[in-house]
Amino acid sequence: MENVNRDKLVADAKAVLDDVDALLRQAAAASGQQAQELRERAAEALHRAKLRLQEAQASVSETAKATARATDDWVHAHPWGAIGVAAGVGFLIGLLVARR
């Protein structure tokens, strides 16, 4: 689910940036009132993109905090299991490093 949200966010940001790029190109070719309107539309699109990125950052931050809390709770509830997992991961890393 997190990958889907991240992929959607990236696609949305790319679409907004493409729109802004097109609007700025049109604004460069236009003059007067039309150029001003195009610049305003570009600024609005950038503002929307900024808000979406802030929402995504908040979501990722909350997910990371929840994951950290869950991990901390699990380690406190299963200290020997945590030691075993850490030892196993350390052993595997040692094997991988020794192969090189």
Image: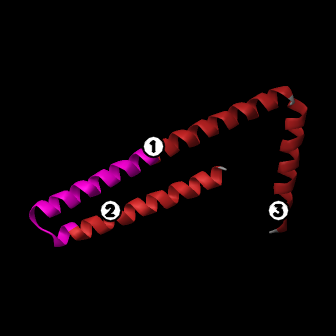
- Structural distance between the alpha carbons of marks 2 and 3: 47 Å
Q: Element at badge 1? A: helix
Q: Element at badge 2? A: helix
Name the main secondary structure of what is drawn in magenta.
Answer: helix
User: Residue 98 sits in which quadrant?
Assistant: bottom right
Q: In this picture, which residue range is highlighted in magenta?
A: 27-52
Mark in front: 2 vs 3: 2
Give the residue type that dot 3 points to. Leu
- Residue 7 is left or right of residue 85, and the answer is left
User: In the picture, which quadrant includes the C terminus?
Assistant: bottom right
Q: Element at badge 3? A: helix
Q: Is residue 71 magenta?
A: no
List the residue tagged with mark 2: 20
Q: In this rendering, is residue 8 above or below 51?
A: below
Q: Residue furthest bottom?
A: 29
Could you say where residue 69 lies in the image, as x and y percent from the top left?
70, 31
3 or 1: tag closer to the N-terminus = 1
List the residue tagged with mark 3: 96
Give the residue type that dot 2 points to. Val
- Structural distance between the alpha carbons of marks 3 and 1: 39 Å
List the residue tagged with mark 1: 54
Could you say where residue 27 lies in the image, as x and y percent from the top left?
20, 66
Q: Residue at x 80, y 62 (%)?
A: 97
- Residue 28 is left or right of residue 77, and the answer is left
Q: Residue at x 38, y 62 (%)?
A: 17
Q: Residue at x 75, y 35 (%)?
A: 71
| Nearest the eye: 69 or 42 | 42
Could you say where residue 14 lies in the image, as x and y percent from the top left?
45, 62
Could you say where residue 64 lies in the image, as x and y percent from the top left?
63, 39
Q: Residue furthest left?
A: 32
Mark in front: 1 vs 2: 2
